[in-house]
Image (tube, rainbow, N blue to C red):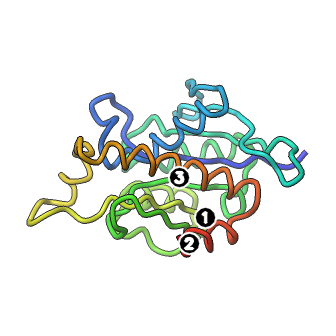
Amino acid sequence: MSDPWLVVGLGNPEARYARNRHNVGHMVVELLAGRAGSRLTRHKARAQVAEVRLGLLPGGAPGPRVVLAEPAAFMNLSGGPVKALAQFYGIDPTARLLVVHDELDLPAHQLRLKRGGGEGGHNGLRSVSQALGTRDYARLRVGVGRPPGRQDPADYVLSDFPSREREELAVTLEQAADAVEAVVTVGFEIVQQRLRSA
């Protein structure tokens, strides 16, 4: 049986952060768990986890085993739980880890896949890279756009999506969940190209 994938949604763990732009990674992971008829439960690696099968492989067979996870630590401490989960499940982060996170440098609701590179000032990604000792892992970047005027980017990402964006956000989350399923069933490069062309 092939090794599972580890799909990590970044965010902050307390309920008051649940609808923040910074928590879009959590939103995607929770949607994927719901699609699979599962829910996230506490794991000893300081995370909330659901072990599922995602999507269908070409030919109609059930998709691969996937560990969906949210670190139960604040964003800037995400790396410890991600490393512990990778070790617990025997996952090579450079091959079968996908981190879902908010991205200031993309227009709101745009999706892009990236492997490796810098963290762009994202404290969650910085923590993951430091803990793993590598930046060479896959990321699904969910655009939240830049703050208006002179608003501090930190305040902006820690604010909720406005009500006028909720309908569009729901579509974005479904598209992001679709992209995750496609990465684990048809491959990173194929989905990366699809998103670039969208």
- Of labels 3 and 2, earlier in sequence is 2
Residue in the picture at 56% in, 68% down: 195
Comparing 56 with 2, the one in front is 56
Residue 178 x %, y %: 60, 51
- Of labels 3 and 1, earlier in sequence is 1
Residue in the picture at 52% in, 56% down: 131
Name the amino acid type tagged 2.
Answer: Gly
Residue 111 x %, y %: 48, 63
Q: Quadrant of residue 161?
A: top left
Residue receiving disc 3: 175
User: Would you say 165 lies left or right of 52 here?
Assistant: left
Residue receiving disc 2: 116
Report if the CB atoms under discs 2 and 1 are less than 8 Å apart: yes
Q: CA distance from mark 3 to mark 1?
A: 21 Å
User: Would you say 77 lies left or right of 165 here?
Assistant: right
At label 3, counting other C-alpha atoms closer than 10 Å, the crowd grade (few under 14, some 14-19, many 20 or more) is some
Q: CA distance from mark 2 to mark 1?
A: 5 Å
Q: Quadrant of residue 135?
A: bottom right
Name the amino acid type tagged 3.
Answer: Gln
